[in-house]
Image (cartoon, rainbow, N blue to C red):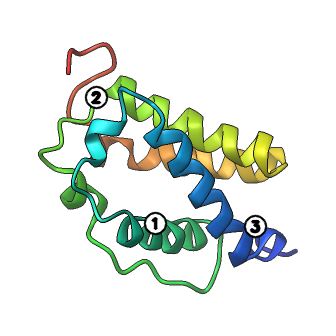
Amino acid sequence: MASYYEQVGASTIRDVVDRFYVVVLDDAELKPYFDGVDMVRLKRHMVMLLCSVLGGPEVYEGHDLGDAHRGMGITGDHYERVGRILVTVLREDFGADDGLVGHVATVLGQVRGSIVEKPVGAAG
C-alpha cells in the first residue's frame, strides 16, 4: 500500500503548506506568532515535517518542536485553531481523504504537549 506521501506527492504538500500559511497569517489571533519570522525558512521546515509525517523520504532536520516553540506562549486554543486550519486546508482545498486527515490529526495530538504552553481557555 502506498504511503500518504506517495498518494499526494511533494508538490502537493508544498501547495498545502503555502495555502495553510495564507490562512494562518490571515487570522488576526494567529498572525502575531509569526511577526519577524523568516516565512520562507518556516515553510521549508513545515514541508519537510509534513512530508516526513506522511511517510516521505524527507528527514525533518529542524529544531525539536518543543525547542522551536518554547517561550512563544502558544495557547491550547490557538494550537487547536491551527490544527483545524491544517485539517480544513487538507480536506477542503486539496481533497485529502479521511485516512490522511486522521493520520495528521493523530500526529497533531501526539506533539501537542511539546508546543502548547497554556491550556485551552487560558488567556494569552
> Which of labels 3 and 1 is toward the front?
1
The vertical placement of 83 against 62, above or below, is above
The vertical placement of 43 against 113, above or below, is below
Q: CA distance from mark 3 to mark 1?
A: 20 Å
Disc 3 target residue: 4
Q: Amino acid at mark 1?
A: Lys
In this view of the protein, which residue sits in the foreground, 37 or 121? 37
Disc 1 target residue: 43
The vertical placement of 96 against 91, above or below, is below
Disc 2 target residue: 75
Q: Percent x, y for residue 9? A: 76, 75
Q: Amino acid at mark 3?
A: Tyr
> Which of labels 1 and 2 is toward the front?
1
In this view of the protein, which residue sits in the foreground, 27 or 8? 27
Quadrant including the N terminus: bottom right
Q: Amino acid at mark 2?
A: Thr
